[in-house]
């Protein structure tokens, strides 16, 4: 397994890079944004995924450096895309926050500095925070989220419906987007919940409309799923149907092909 020394070296030697998974406007089929997903190209072990190194980073206190790196890389790529392509004002790149980042006051100082270094693209950057992270300490989350919003960042609630008491709290948090996890989205015979998915999705869409939230469906893999999401008037979709995480250069080519 990777160690703290390993991760520290990886961070110093540029082994960690974000990739970008496209997020598509489900009605136009155009790429509307992307999620930045960190990958660690380990010299001996090959690609290490965030499921392994994010918990390691949290345990060892390296998470703040990792978080700044992810944001800096995403902001740099966003600046390049905004400067070279005729993207619209709504184009966004999202960056994930881990549980300990939201809990720590350091996040606000880091984000204040990062936003002032990336003023021109701050409005195109969106922080993704899971519902269970937010609900761990709703009062503190409300304070942190309001401060992040004031910096001009956009906010997405990730894994909607998997935490607790989301409905009673949702209006208290300044999210502009909710992300629906794959189990509510994917059509599979084994899941045994296919007949409950449509009513659940319909309620989520109604709630999102009331609260003026954009909805991103995750884990979209098939044409059948795309068609069902279109019928539900879902705004955005992300998943292997449109592409897995790819390098910035690869996503540049896909974006260029749209114009
Ligand atoms: O595609 P993937 O295996 O990358 O994503 C696995 C998980 O890792 C996802 O839940 C994603 O939110 C998380 N993740 C990906 N990149 C980052 C990152 O830069 N920071 C944090 N905190 N989590 C990330
Ligand atoms: O941030 P989040 O926890 O939502 O991370 C998304 C995870 O789901 C990542 O590990 C990503 O690689 C993965 N993923 C993205 N698209 C698909 C998909 O279409 N199908 C499946 N099974 N996984 C996906
Ligand atoms: Mn995410
Ligand atoms: Na998710």
Image (cartoon, rainbow, N blue to C red):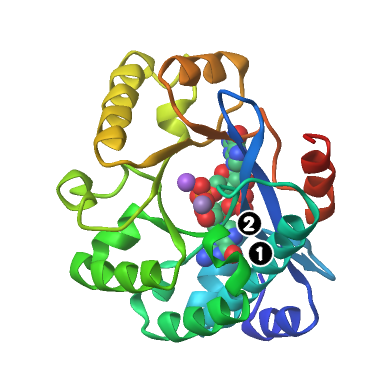
Which residue position is annotated with label 2?
A: 36
The residue wearing badge 1 is 74
| Residue 22 position within the rendered picture, expressed as x and y whole percent measured from the top left | 66, 42
Q: Is residue 52 above or below residue 244?
A: below
Q: Is residue 67 above or below residue 93?
A: below
Quadrant of the frame with the N terminus = bottom right
When asked about the image quadrant of residue 3, the answer is: bottom right
Q: Is residue 252 above or below residue 139?
A: above
Q: Residue at x 18, y 48 (%)?
A: 165
221 or 9: which is nearer to us?
221
In the displayed structure image, the side of residue 210 where residue 93 appears, left or right: right
Q: Nearer the viewer, residue 53 or 130?
A: 130
Q: Is residue 95 visible?
A: no
Give the position of the C terminus as an image quadrant.
Answer: top right
The alpha-carbon separation of the residues under discs 2 and 1 comes to 6 Å
- Identify which residue is drawn at 62% across, 81% down: 117
């Amino acid at each position: 397994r990777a160690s703290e020394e390993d991760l520290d070296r990886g961070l110093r030697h540029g082994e960690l890079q974000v990739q970008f998974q496209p997020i598509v406007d489900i009605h136009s089929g155009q790429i509307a944004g992307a999620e930045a997903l960190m990958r660690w190209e380990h010299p001996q072990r090959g690609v290490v995924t965030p499921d392994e190194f994010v918990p390691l980073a949290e345990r060892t206190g390296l998470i703040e450096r990792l978080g700044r790196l992810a944001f800096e890389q995403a902001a740099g790529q966003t600046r390049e895309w905004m400067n070279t392509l005729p993207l619209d004002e709504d184009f966004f790149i999202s960056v994930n926050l881990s549980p300990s980042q939201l809990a720590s006051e350091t996040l606000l100082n880091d984000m204040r500095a990062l936003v002032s270094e990336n003023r021109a693209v701050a409005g195109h950057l969106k922080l993704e925070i899971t519902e269970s992270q937010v609900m761990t300490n709703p009062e503190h989350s409300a304070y942190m989220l309001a401060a992040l919003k004031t910096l001009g960042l956009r906010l997405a609630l990730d894994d909607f419906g998997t935490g607790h008491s989301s409905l009673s709290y949702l209006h208290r948090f300044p999210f502009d987007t909710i992300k629906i996890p794959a189990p509510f989205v994917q059509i599979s015979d084994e899941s045994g919940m296919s007949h409950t998915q449509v009513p659940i999705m319909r309620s989520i869409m109604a709630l999102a409309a009331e609260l003026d939230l954009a909805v991103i469906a995750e884990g979209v893999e098939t044409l059948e799923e795309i068609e069902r999401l279109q019928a539900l008037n879902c705004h955005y979709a992300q998943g292997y149907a449109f592409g897995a995480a790819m390098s910035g250069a690869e996503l540049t080519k896909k974006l260029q092909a749209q114009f």
